Image (spheres, grey):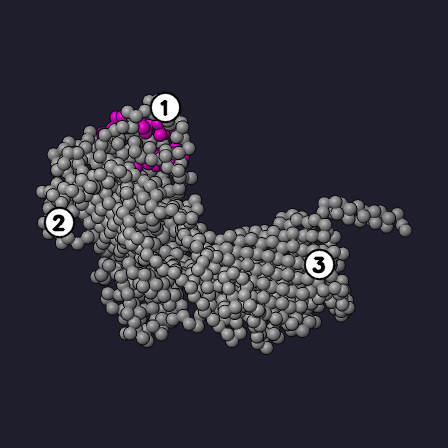
Amino acid sequence: MSPQALLECFCLLCFSFLRTAKGDLQPLSFQPRTLYQYHYTLDVQLDHVAPPSPGGVWLRAQASVHVRRLWRDQSGDELLQVQIRDLEAQHKPDEERSQDGPGGPPAEIELSQEAKAELQKPVFISWNSGKVKAFYGNEAESILISNLKRGIISLLQLQPHAGTTVEEDASGSCQVTYAVSNHSVTKTKDLLSCTKPNSGFTSVNKVFGVEWQPSSRSQYVVKDNLLQSALAEESHVLAPALRSSSSIKISSRQQLQLLSPPMPGPAEVSGQSLEDVLAGTEGRHQPLGMASLPFRRVCTSCPSLRAHLKAFDRWGVKTDPSKVATAWQFQRFIQMLRSAKKRDVLELLRRAPEETRPFVVEAAVAAQSTASLAALSEFLDFSKEEPKSLLEKFLYPAAFSPRPSGELLHLVLDKLDGKQLAPEIWETGIVAVGSLVGKLCQQKLCGLQEVERGLETILRGLRSAEEDPEVVIYLLALGNAMLPGTIPTLLEHAEEGPAAVTTTAISALRRFPAQNISSKVKRAMRRIFHEKRKSYEKTCRLAAAEILLDNHPSPMDVINILLATQEMETEMAKLLLLKVQNSLHAHHHPARKIRKDIMGVPQINNYHFFSKVGTSSSFSGPLTVTQDLLSTFGLDLLFLEGGFLRKSISEFSLLSRGRRLRAAQVTIEAQGMESMMGENISGGEEEPELMAGMSVTFFDVQLRPIVFFQGYTDLMAKVLLSSGEPTSVVKGNLLLMDHHQVIPLQSGLQVTIKLQGGLGLDISADMDVGIWEQELKTSINTRGSLSMDFQAELDSPFLQATLRSQTEVETSIHFDTTLRFSSSPVLMCLQLREEQVPYREIFTVSKSAGSQSSTTRKGRRGTMPGREFALHQTNSKVCNLLLTLEKE
């Protein structure tokens, strides 16, 4: 042997020794003239996690998989032919599945001759030591069968050495981590990292989305450079974020086992290139992607809008949004409209009776299809005397859209552009534009031309606005948008504007997350609170203090705020001290972390400091606690020194998995009461006009303000001519949850997750001022219904199945405030009560295999008793006293 050959052998031995020392395996290869037979098994199971469950879905497929090498080039790339033979599929019928076990024997699924023929057609891969470099097949083949073959090919995707890399298989392009030990290779796939085309959509607000917990692990055994076996297991647990009891679990298990010994096979094919070899095989084979192709199931039982129009006169549309029947009907209309043509949507809008037309407009906006938006564009004419309610029914659902599109914003802007609109419609339209701009940016669509146009509409209007009410509306829109780039504009108006403008700008800043509240913002809030440059109205100072308290507060800021209360009026000081105390003691509040620093100051940590007298109050506490969320109620009441209510803020919040959603915030303000009652205005404050009004933030969307009265003349007119009817704040139907997710399993089967949640709301408010009785009563009544439909659809070449969980709830909540000024001190009673809550859940399993189909259901219903919330002990005593006085 020559010295050079000895050197090469020595280097090869050293290289092999080093790879073995690291735990790596020798390069993998399939030998020529050899037919490798593997036994393939696939098991898939879908189940409702929580009882009562009507069972689930179980599917098994078994086949023989033949692998042979057709050709190999000089670099080591091998062209492999992979063929499925003798596939058999089984499932468990419903009557043979039990809650405690798998039940009786499985039933065979009869495959059509066409499916059998397609399944046996081979596919080809370019493969090098475990890496699938290219995949070749027939692009005209059935998607489901082609994906099944991708699932088998995915089992041949591995690497013989440890490390982390990105691989493409049936799941998509995913990050995988390999560990190697002896003859074993373990692959862990990060399914959350997978990228794939057409993966669906979800709600912008994750509180209304779907929680997804996936896992994937594969185990390979390699001996003598040959793959002996592969076992791949993955699981997915999915549930609506607000309701984990509706969880669905998906389990998939693939196994490939070499049948020994390998059999003699045909000789390799000669050819200069891979393309030449493929050209010589039977059939046409094009390069295809490894990721599974999305399959869209055709619903044959779903109602169509065309069929609905034919039977239109016999269809009754329910329009009471507080009833679940209306919420379910709303979802059905959305589904019909999403698959309808423009002419049919337009016909529906024109033929709908006047009382049901707003319902149809809401559904068309929620559907957000190209056809439905085009029909709305043609039907709605903002330049004509359209009913205000119909135009608002278009704008409000747009503002609350869970995942708006650029086309929807484009439509809203076109309808507002250059029109002479009623003030209410213009205000609603501008705040809707702000909401749409913000949600599109949250979807990483800030670069859309429509977004830039919408933001410019707001900023240009703000620059040209001459009256304070106009400025307030544009600032509300910026608050809905929550774009960090607009913070300097908000700061300018917060520091330099009049009281109403300052309060609105600070309220908009409060909506930004903590990471956007920079040191510059905090410096401006300190100047406002401590009145460094000019005097500010007390509500402005309180709002500035809340930004400092709620966003990673520093001990010095909190100490300075507390010390400043010693120089304030009694009522303002009382409210602020209570808010600081609540912040320091609340488990989820950031100020809790610096509690020891604050209480370490002797000047502050004493009974006398916090024992301010006054009627103003601040309260917050839990309403409902479940494993998924915490709902809280907070109430701030600021009184004038004479005892009249200046401002009340009631807030319902949801906290779920580290996310916070302001479900509803209702602010009622009354100003100018000091002069009416003969009191003096505080030094440095402007004398405000007599007025009372309300503003509402609902699901993080600020609505236009509502004025109860403005000026003494308006007040007296409404007192004398009042019809006693409450003011409608929101009434209608909203699409709250909208989620569509395609999960390609590594096996090549597909699971589609769908979540849709419809919300019907009827919120009204009333304010009754008793001049002679010296009594003020406010009431906010909320009646609502929620319907939630959560589905998991399994699609395979031999079986289709759907697991479905439907939940419905009706609720009614009343919040009443009574203030009596004839007593000294002023008597105040707050009542928050909830009527009984009926609910129902239905769990369904539907499946179709061959010529057989079945559906099973289980459900439960009940009624949660009504309750009245005890807000705090002092309030309960005053309410009892007022009730006694009323009886007398």
Reply above or below: 402 against 509: below
Which residue is at 40% across, 48% downward? 626
Residue 540 placement: quadrant: top left
Residue 14 visible from this viewpoint = yes
Q: Earlier in the sequence, mark 1 or mark 2?
A: 1
Residue highlighted by disc 2 = 718
Quadrant of the snapshot with the C terminus: top left
Residue 859 placement: quadrant: bottom left
Q: What secondary structure predominates along the stretch shown in magenta?
A: helix
Residue 469 visible from this viewpoint = no
Q: Position of residue 846 (x, y in %)?
A: 47, 68
Residue highlighted by disc 1 = 601
Tag nearer the camera, 3 or 2: 3
Q: Amino acid at mark 2?
A: Lys
Q: Are marks 3 and 1 in contact (CB under 8 Å)?
A: no
Q: Amino acid at mark 1?
A: Val
Reply above or below: 585 against 847: above
Give the SS element for disc 3.
strand
Q: Earlier in the sequence, mark 3 or mark 2?
A: 3
Residue highlighted by disc 3 = 227
Q: Earlier in the sequence, mark 3 or mark 1?
A: 3
Q: What are the residue bounds of the magenta stretch?
A: 543-570
Which residue is at 50% across, 69% downward? 95
